[in-house]
Amino acid sequence: MHMKKTLIPRAILFLTSVLVFGQNKPDIPDGEVIRYKTLLGRRGEEVEYSSQSIYRITEENQEYYLLKSRSPGQSTETKISIDSFIPIAMNKTVYGERSDINTSISLLTEPYLSPDEIALIDTNDMANVLRAYPFDTPRDMTLIFLGQGGNEMNDMSFRIIFRGEETISLNNREYKAWKLELKAELDGAMAFFASMIPKTYLWFSREDSRHLLKMTGSRGPGAENAITLEMISYTR
């Protein structure tokens, strides 16, 4: 089964997009490879392994990061503008018992963003797009999902909140990290459910590459849907 979507963003203003992260872009090396493990359930009863690799590519005189990620349930390829750090195309295959489903999304032009907005096509983009968060001058920012729509999104928004600096331990090694929180904000009839949405926290390395070290959150309500993602290895 194959589904293809082509999205037209709400406005066109390339220079504004560049200025959002102009002074805060991370130094991501060509050929970077990161492996992760995800603990499922409150006590980590199940474990899934995933990996991602990033390459620098040039198309029509524009430079992009090509992000390839793979986990037991899906594989994705995402193209992120090096200048603006906005994802502009994604191809995702979700593996199913009866059939695999492929979704392709491409932006016809880069969207207009205010200085306090961060754009994603899919949740798979988040860990890498947030590497360009302005950690040196932190502020609350709004997360814009370009690849999702529908009336249910009209009453929902997401905020990125800076929670300071921490030292975390992974694989018997300590890492200096920045901590961010992803917080859902609901309006109207959806506001009743705000307290039911688990908080998501992300820890990013304070090295120049600013890669994701750890994330905690949930795939849905209930303790059995709790997840903790942790980096296993990093090579560049």
Image (cartoon, rainbow, N blue to C red):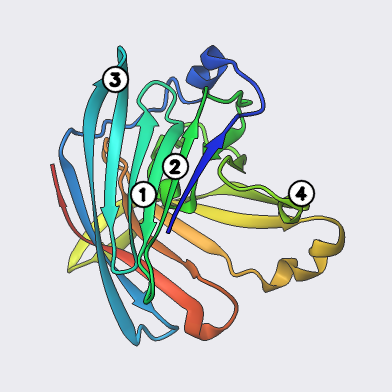
Q: Is residue 45 above or below residue 182?
A: below
Q: In this view, does 133 lie above or below 192?
A: above
Determine crowd level at label 1: few under 14, some 14-19, many 20+ residues with C-alpha closer than 10 A. Answer: many
Dot 2 or dot 4, earlier in sequence: 2
What's the residue type where badge 4 is placed?
A: Asn
Residue at which label 3 appears: 59
Dot 4 or dot 3, earlier in sequence: 3
Residue at which label 4 appears: 154
Name the residue rendered at 31%, 27% in the picture.
64
Rendered-image quadrant of the C terminus? top left
Q: Point out which mark residue 204 bears.
A: 1
Rendered-image quadrant of the N terminus? bottom left
* Eye-nearest disc, 2 or 4: 4
Measured as percent of width and height from the top left, residue 62 is found at 33, 16
What's the residue type where badge 1 is placed?
A: Phe
* Eye-nearest disc, 4 or 3: 3
Name the residue rendered at 29%, 78% in the picture.
47
* Eye-nearest disc, 1 or 2: 2
Question: Do the numbered discs 1 and 2 sit on residues whose CB atoms are within 8 Å?
Answer: yes
Dot 1 or dot 4, earlier in sequence: 4
What's the residue type where badge 3 is placed?
A: Glu
Measured as percent of width and height from the top left, residue 46 is found at 32, 83
